[in-house]
Amino acid sequence: MNEKDGDDFVTCLICQKLMKRVTNSHLKRHSLDFTIYKAKFPLAQLSSLKSRKKYSLSMTGRKLSTELRQKLSKIHKGKIIPSEVRLKISQTQKGRKLSKETIEKRKLFYKTYGHPSKGRILSEETKKKISEAGKGRSPPNKGKPVPEEVKKKIREKLKGRPLSFETRQKMKAARQNISLETRLKISRALKGKQKIRRNLEKKVAKPNKFEARCISLFEENNIPLKFVGDYRAGFFIEGKIPDFVATNNKKLLIEVFCDYYKIKQYGSVENYKNKRESLFSKYGWKTLFFSDNDIKLKTKECLDIIKKELN
Ligand SMILES: [Zn+2]
């Protein structure tokens, strides 16, 4: 038997004889049967590699009847798989990709019947083993950017959620130091705070007609002033935004206003001017105020005052 192809034969692990199959009748010679033989040699094969391959090929794609599957399941239930066999199974399963169809089927199954391990009570020993195995392993999505699609989903899910008192306080504190744009976002998140939102949105509609007129007036007269009344310009002093700022290194701010709105908002024009002026002066800014009527009726005088201040 020296030149024979090893794949054609299997070895009896008791007497080392080569044969096509280890049969029950052969095992009888050793006073054994399949069950005892398999228990003695868990990895032992009962037939040659060739015939096993043939069988496997013939089984590929075959669907087992429910009846047979239940039978097999009954046979295998409670069976303890030897660690060598388990290792082998694990190796052949590694890197295996499930077909989309199979994945969908499983998902449906889990959805209907729950995950098979759901509700299973693990022993302390098992839990410890799982914990040990997981140590040092990082989640597969660690360091990977979250796709825009997923972000959108999260955002949708979080929309309109009630916020805890603590969170609202945090947001409030943070608001002192952040841009109007961000404040708008927060205010949108805070449902029911409609008033804040309306006020902020009003501020966003910049420049208004009057301010736009001032912008062109200053431009036409070559006055070094920049309109920063739009929050997007990013000019804030304790969260307040003046209308114009000097661009020639003078610490000068220009506020243009309509009496009507300031009286409505501050009670009086004086109160408005005082409040703004004292705030800005804290940071070394001088502020000049011009009402729409000043600009309209005494344009030249207004421009002269500004020019003088900027020289
Ligand atoms: Zn034998």
Image (cartoon, rainbow, N blue to C red):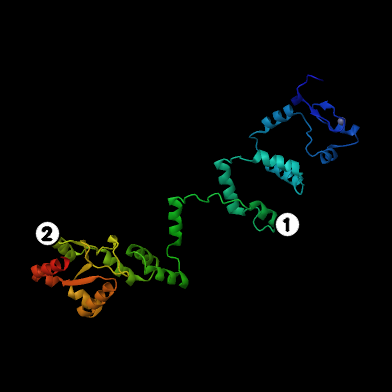
Q: Is residue 244 left or right of residue 128?
A: left
Residue 164, above or below 19: below
Question: Is residue 153 visible in the rendered structure shown here?
Answer: yes
Q: Picture coordinates of residue 50 (x, y %)?
A: 73, 27
Q: Can you identify the residue that label 2 sits on? A: 220
Query: What amino acid type is highlighted by mark number 2?
Result: Glu
Q: Earlier in the sequence, mark 1 or mark 2?
A: 1
Q: CA distance from mark 1 to mark 2?
A: 83 Å
Disc 2 within 8 angstroms of ligand 1 (CB): no
Residues under numbered marks 1 and 2 in contact, where contact means CB atoms less than 8 Å apart:
no
Residue at (84% x, 40% y) in the render: 40
Q: Is residue 112 left or right of residue 200?
A: right
Report crowding for label 2: few under 14, some 14 to 19, many 20 or more residues within 10 A (C-alpha).
few
Q: Picture coordinates of residue 208 (x, y %)?
A: 20, 64
Disc 1 within 8 angstroms of ligand 1 (CB): no
The answer to which of 132 and 43 lies nearer the viewer is 132
**Regarding ligand 1, which quadrant of the image does it lie in?**
top right
The mark found on residue 125 in the picture is 1
Q: Nearer the viewer, mark 1 or mark 2?
A: 2
The answer to which of 25 and 213 lies nearer the viewer is 213
For residue 151, what is the image quadrant?
bottom left
Query: What amino acid type is highlighted by mark number 1?
Result: Glu
Q: Is residue 242 left or right of residue 220?
A: right
Residue 221, above or below 276: above
Residue at (79% x, 29% y) in the render: 10
Which type of secondary structure does the marked residue at label 1 adopt?
helix
Which type of secondary structure does the marked residue at label 2 adopt?
helix
Q: Quadrant of the image for the C terminus?
A: bottom left
